[in-house]
Image: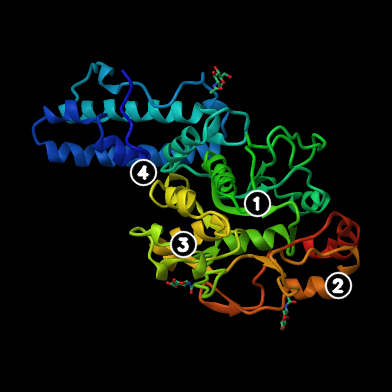
């Protein structure tokens, strides 16, 4: 018999709590007198044990945990038989010990899962639904060692500016993970030493302006969430370049109190004009928001995005060109519930000054020190409540022929 899992919106429940609330402990404990005390004692032991295991794991590396793979969820725990004790244990101690062992088994099984450690392989054939369910089940996992930033590249195919990114990531291996969504069937042509090697996720076709763009974003988030050390999630494209060194960005984003999502309430046909009454009752006109799709979110918000079953269908059904879901879904959904967690700006600079539906594409001749300095340090914004000039950490759109001048002019800034 398998342990019955909660619906996936319950991901916020953390491991020890869910085990106490769920079916794992209660049947035996209920028969014990002084039930309340037992639960408190049990909770205490569980917390202690969890801390010890977390500590031991971080210190001791993973080798001891390379046990046989088992499937999630954990086995039915009612079948557990407490070990016999030769000396005189109190009833309470027996229960605590057996519960500790249950928890230990559970954690060992959890850790032996490939996806728990992230990155072993991104090859899976889960549907989006399965992926999001799995992502929600790893969500409450509290045992992180080092926080990583997930760089999620939404691309058509090749990564012409890859050499810039290779330089950017070099030496920071413990602090990032990379996910690449391409057109289906495309295989990135990168050498085995590349940071992009083996980082393609199972992808599906994406049409510009279509809900499939949002699907790809959620698919990237879903895959990235499976690595429980990913704390922050940033969406980028193949035309993006970094503006500051990796470590500058890492410190900035890890220490930020906000997620970087643009949130505009734009009047006129390209903003509120895209709203339809069919969005009601979930979304009213004054809740409608717009932003460039290039977001950065915390793990907490990422989980809400992949498990949302209320707002997503609204956009899938009612936001069709000239309404573009990728510009409205995340800003609208997040600002309704999590407005105070948003910085209300993007970390990716985009130049719209030349007009039209697409931003400026920089070409070879555009690349000057002046341009790069302007992008790097010529804006005003707030960071954790303090005003500053460093607002953008990435910029787009850069054509493939900018690689050479960028490598020459930009090298210093990235190291
Ligand atoms: C996924 O892969 C497994 C083994 O690789 C296979 O047994 C299963 O049928 C596949 N599922 C789908 C939906 O393709
Ligand atoms: C962003 O806007 C929301 C209101 O939508 C506000 O609550 C929040 O404080 C703003 N964020 C910052 C960093 O000012
Ligand atoms: C950014 O620009 C401001 C003035 O615009 C200047 O005072 C500051 O030193 C610059 N910072 C860097 C890192 O270049």
Q: Which mark is residue 369?
A: 2
Q: Indicate whether 16 appears above or below 340.
A: above
Ligand 2 contact, mark 1 (Cβ < 8 Å): no
Q: Residues within 10 Å of mark 1 (few under 14, many from 20)?
A: few
Residue drawn at (27%, 25%) of the image: 98
Q: Nearer the viewer, mark 3 or mark 1?
A: 1
Q: Nearer the viewer, mark 2 or mark 4?
A: 4
Tag 2 or tag 1, which sits nearer the N-term?
1
Identify residue for label 4: 9
Label 1 element class = loop
Tag 3 or tag 2, which sits nearer the N-term?
3
Q: Nearer the viewer, mark 2 or mark 3?
A: 3
> In this image, 327 relative to 186: left or right?
left
Q: Position of residue 228 (x, y in %)?
A: 51, 42
Residue nearest the viewer, comparing 67 with 292:
292
| Ligand 3 image-quadrant field | bottom right
C-alpha gap between disc 4 and disc 1: 29 Å
Q: Position of residue 370 (x, y in %)?
A: 84, 76
> In this image, 49 relative to 177: left or right?
left
Tag 4 or tag 3, which sits nearer the N-term?
4
Circles 2 and 3 in contact, beta carbons < 8 Å? no
Tag 4 or tag 2, which sits nearer the N-term?
4
Q: Residue farthest to the left? A: 33
Identify residue for label 3: 332
Residue drawn at (82%, 65%) of the image: 362
Q: Indicate whether 212 appears above or below 359.
A: above
Q: Nearer the viewer, mark 4 or mark 1?
A: 1
C-alpha gap between disc 3 and disc 1: 19 Å
Residue nearest the viewer, comparing 130 with 52:
130
Q: Which mark is residue 208?
A: 1
Q: Residues within 10 Å of mark 4 (few under 14, many from 20)?
A: some
């Amino acid at each position: 018999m398998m342990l019955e899992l909660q619906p996936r919106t319950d991901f916020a429940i953390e491991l020890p709590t869910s085990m106490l609330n769920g079916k794992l402990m209660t049947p035996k404990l209920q028969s014990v007198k002084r039930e309340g005390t037992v639960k408190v004692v049990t909770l205490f032991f569980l917390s202690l044990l969890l801390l010890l295991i977390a500590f031991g794991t971080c210190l001791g590396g993973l080798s001891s945990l390379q046990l046989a793979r088992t499937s999630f969820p954990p086995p039915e725990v009612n079948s557990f038989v407490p070990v016999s004790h030769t000396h005189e244990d109190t009833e309470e101690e027996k229960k605590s010990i057996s519960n500790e062992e249950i928890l230990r088994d559970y954690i060992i099984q959890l850790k032996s899962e490939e996806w728990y450690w992230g990155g072993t392989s991104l090859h899976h054939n889960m549907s989006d639904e399965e992926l999001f369910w799995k992502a929600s089940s790893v969500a409450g996992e509290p045992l992180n060692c080092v926080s990583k930033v997930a760089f999620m590249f939404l691309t058509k195919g090749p990564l012409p500016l890859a050499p810039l990114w290779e330089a950017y990531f070099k030496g920071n291996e413990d602090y990032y993970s990379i996910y690449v969504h391409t057109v289906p069937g495309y295989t990135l042509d990168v050498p085995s030493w590349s940071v992009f090697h083996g980082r393609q996720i199972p992808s599906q076709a994406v049409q510009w302006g279509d809900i499939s763009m949002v699907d790809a974003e959620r698919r990237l988030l879903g895959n990235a969430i499976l690595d429980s050390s990913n704390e922050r999630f940033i969406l980028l494209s193949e035309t993006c370049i970094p503006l500051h060194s990796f470590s500058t960005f890492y410190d900035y984003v890890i220490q930020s109190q906000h997620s970087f999502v643009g949130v505009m309430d734009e009047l006129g046909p390209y903003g509120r004009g895209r709203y339809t009454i069919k969005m009601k009752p979930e979304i009213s006109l004054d809740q409608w928001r717009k932003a460039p799709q290039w977001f950065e979110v915390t793990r907490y918000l990422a989980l809400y995005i992949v498990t949302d079953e209320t707002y997503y269908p609204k956009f899938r059904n009612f936001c069709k060109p000239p309404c573009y879901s990728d510009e409205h879904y995340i800003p609208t959904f997040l600002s309704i519930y999590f407005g105070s967690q948003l910085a209300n700006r993007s970390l990716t600079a985009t130049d719209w000054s030349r007009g039209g539906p697409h931003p400026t594409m920089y070409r070879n001749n555009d690349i000057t020190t002046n341009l790069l300095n302007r992008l790097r340090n010529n804006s005003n914004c707030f960071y954790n409540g303090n005003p500053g000039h460093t607002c953008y950490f990435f910029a787009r759109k850069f054509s493939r022929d900018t690689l050479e001048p960028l490598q020459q002019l930009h090298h210093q800034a990235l190291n």
